[in-house]
């Protein structure tokens, strides 16, 4: 059956001598692999661009379908300073998205995140934290409180990977997050670089727990 659907090019690589394999994020199927026929460096190949939305057409009856047509439907010109960040979030999606997830929700957030990168003035570290936080929520591994209670701005917290954030009395641990920063984190308003680094380290450890064989290298570029 011939299928047409909007999607984003996430990753591509050369396949044999005259083709390439592209990995596309679709709102209904997650990441789908397609074969693009033609010389790897021909003009059609160069029309593909990361971070732009395309309408892809292919035959869905094959497990490894051939791309028959594509057209640009949404040109998202993200600021060049976020290009490496964009590569990192594509890597996160490519290496984590599996069957059973809410693909449409992830797709919509990815698209809105790219739109944000066209006008944002935030640091790449802060934006990476926001994307990681949302992705973990959608994967079912999101950061949470140990008990269902309000966060106290006067208290300090540490993350227990089995229980969640819980109050800690001793202040010598480098992974301590103060209540004010924790509130900002959950409201997506955190801007302090030190707190961002601590929380990102926690989220990377969670990713490593669930994807032990995967190395996430992209954030070392920014």
Image (cartoon, rainbow, N blue to C red):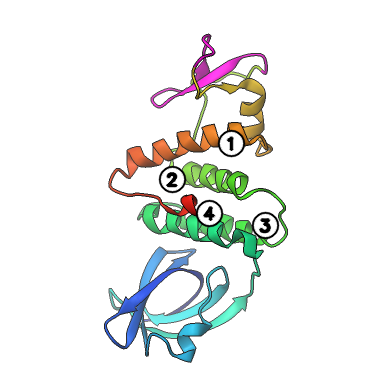
Secondary structure under tag 4 reads helix
Which callout, 4 or 2, points at the residue further toward the start of the chain? 4
Tell me what residue is drawn at x 32 percent, y 45 percent. Answer: 211
Q: CA distance from mark 1 to mark 3?
A: 19 Å
Q: Residue at image x 67%, y 24%?
A: 180
State the CA–CA distance, disc 4 to disc 2: 11 Å
Circle 1 is placed at which residue position?
Answer: 196
Residue sitting at x 40%, y 81% = 58
For label 3, the crowd category at 10 Å Cα-Cα, with few meaning under 14, some 14 to 19 and many 20 or more, is some
Q: Is residue 23 above or below residue 163?
A: below
Is residue 7 rendered to the left or right of residue 187?
Answer: left
**Which badge, 4 or 1, is on the more N-terminal residue?**
4
Mark 2–mark 3 Cα distance, whole angstroms, equals 22 Å
Q: Nearer the viewer, mark 4 or mark 2?
A: 2
The percent position of residue 205, horizontal first and vertical second, equals 40, 36
> In the rendered image, which residue does mark 2 sit on?
139
Magenta region: which residues?
A: 153-172
Instruction: Report which residue position mark 3 lands on.
Output: 116
Sequence-first disc among 3 and 4: 4
> Alpha-carbon neighbours of circle 2 within 10 Å: few (<14), some, or many (≥20)?
some
Q: State how far apart marks 4 and 1 are (Cα).
A: 24 Å
Element at label 2: helix
Q: Earlier in the sequence, mark 1 or mark 3?
A: 3
The residue at which mark 4 appears reads as 105
Nearest to N terminus: mark 2 or mark 3: 3
Q: Marks 1 and 2: CB-CB under 8 Å? A: no
The mark nearer the N terminus, 1 or 2, is: 2
């Amino acid at each position: 059956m011939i299928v047409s659907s909007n999607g984003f090019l996430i990753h591509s690589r050369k396949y044999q001598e005259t083709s390439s394999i592209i990995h596309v994020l679709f709102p209904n199927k997650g990441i789908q692999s397609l074969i693009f026929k033609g010389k790897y460096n021909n003009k059609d190949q160069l029309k593909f661009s990361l971070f732009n939305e395309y309408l892809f057409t292919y035959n869905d009856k094959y497990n490894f379908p051939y791309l028959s047509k594509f057209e640009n439907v949404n040109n998202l010109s993200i600021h060049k300073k976020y290009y490496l960040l964009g590569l990192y979030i594509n890597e996160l999606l490519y290496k984590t998205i599996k069957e059973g997830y809410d693909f449409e929700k992830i797709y919509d957030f990815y698209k809105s995140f790219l739109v944000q990168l066209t006008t944002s003035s935030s640091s790449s570290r802060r934006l990476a934290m926001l994307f990681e936080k949302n992705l973990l929520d959608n994967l079912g591994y999101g950061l949470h409180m140990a008990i269902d209670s309000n966060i106290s701005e006067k208290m300090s917290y540490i993350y227990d990977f089995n229980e969640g954030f819980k109050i800690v009395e001793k202040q010598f641990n480098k992974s301590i997050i103060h209540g004010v920063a924790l509130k900002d984190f959950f409201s997506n308003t955190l801007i302090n670089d030190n707190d961002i680094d601590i929380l990102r380290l926690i989220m990377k450890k969670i990713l490593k727990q669930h994807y032990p064989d995967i190395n996430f290298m992209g954030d070392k570029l920014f």
